Amino acid sequence: MALETQIRQAIRDALTRPSRKPLQWGGLAGYQQLVAVQAVLADVPQAAETGYLRLLAARVQRVIDAHQERAADLARTHEWLHRIAACLAPPAAPPGAPQPAARRSGQVRAAMEGLLAEFGVAPAWQPAQAALERSWRRLWRTWGPQLLYCYDVAGLPADNMQLEGVFGQLRRAQRRISGCKSTAPLRELGQCQILLRAGSQEELLEQLQSVDVATYREQRRRLVAGEAGRQQLRRLHHDPCRTIQELVDRHTARREALTTAVPAPGNTD
């Protein structure tokens, strides 16, 4: 039952991601997660013990079919966003190859105008692409000339990523000084922290050794159990197909173990 609960949680996570609505604009990852779940559940064998999983597979398939066109629209929109980013990004050379010549603002403008002409007008049944086209044309018409200065002025960065990188280094240095990697552990694991005051390493070691081993192991077990759900979601977002396949394999192994443990009718041994 625990394995089936985890599979239900994987489906629910794909439908109700806290960051974005998965079946609206920007939520293509949730749809792809559902597709991965369905691909694994579709291979579940026909058996009395797998009826619940096959029922889940049918319901997931209905959701996928209902939002297939919208997901295709989102996928196509993401492809166009990557093409726009590649058009504005400086040319990158393969490892070991000479650095290509820097592009001028006229070249970037011509390439962007070519993309706009190629994009055309998205039909009404493609709302994501239509919204991208409206925003793209408006922003390019309003801010396009200001974006092109970095290609003609030497040393002018195209974005603030380097400045953000400096801020990131300062944050990491502050974390090293304070000993806190981030503020999340203070919120999530603050109730499990112990503060010790010692004048020497020997005194600190003596205080640590005074902790009961059974109590320490019990607290560690509770901590691992509390983190299991978050780790499962992290694995699910990273590789949903493999994660669901592992759950189904564990379900299959459990069914086989239960079938083997049940004695045959008439066997009194």
Image: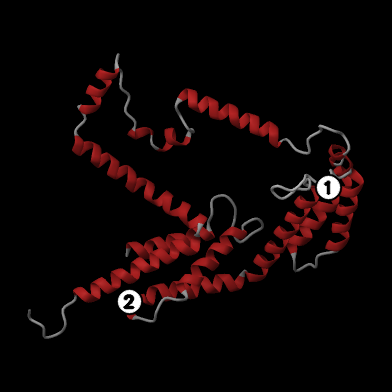
Residue occupying the far left of the picture:
269
- For the residue pair 99 and 3, the one nearer the viewer reads as 99
Count of marks overlaid on the render:
2
Q: For residue 30, which quarter of the picture?
A: bottom right
Residue 72, image x and y in percent?
Answer: 68, 67
Amino acid under disc 2:
Glu
Rendered location of residue 14, percent (x, y): 52, 60
Taking the view exactly as shown, the residue that stands out farthest to the bottom is 266
Q: Quadrant of the N terminus?
A: bottom left
Q: Alpha-carbon neighbours of circle 2 within 10 Å: few (<14), some, or many (≥20)?
A: few
Residue wearing tag 2: 49
Looking at the rendered structure, the secondary structure element under dot 1 is helix
Q: Picture coordinates of residue 44 (x, y %)?
A: 41, 76
Residue at x 21%, y 30% (from the top left corner): 211
Position above or below: 211 against 36: above
Q: Which mark is residue 87?
A: none
Please give the name of the residue rendered at 19% of the width and 76% of the height, measured from the top-left corner: 262
Quarter of the C terminus within the rendering? bottom left
Residue 139, numbered circle = 1
State the image coordinates of residue 38 (x, y, percent, origin top left).
50, 70
Dot 2 falls on a residue whose secondary structure is helix
Label 1 crowding class (10 Å Cα cut-off): few <14, some 14-19, many 20+?
A: few
Q: Amino acid at mark 1?
A: Leu
Colour treatment of the image:
secondary structure
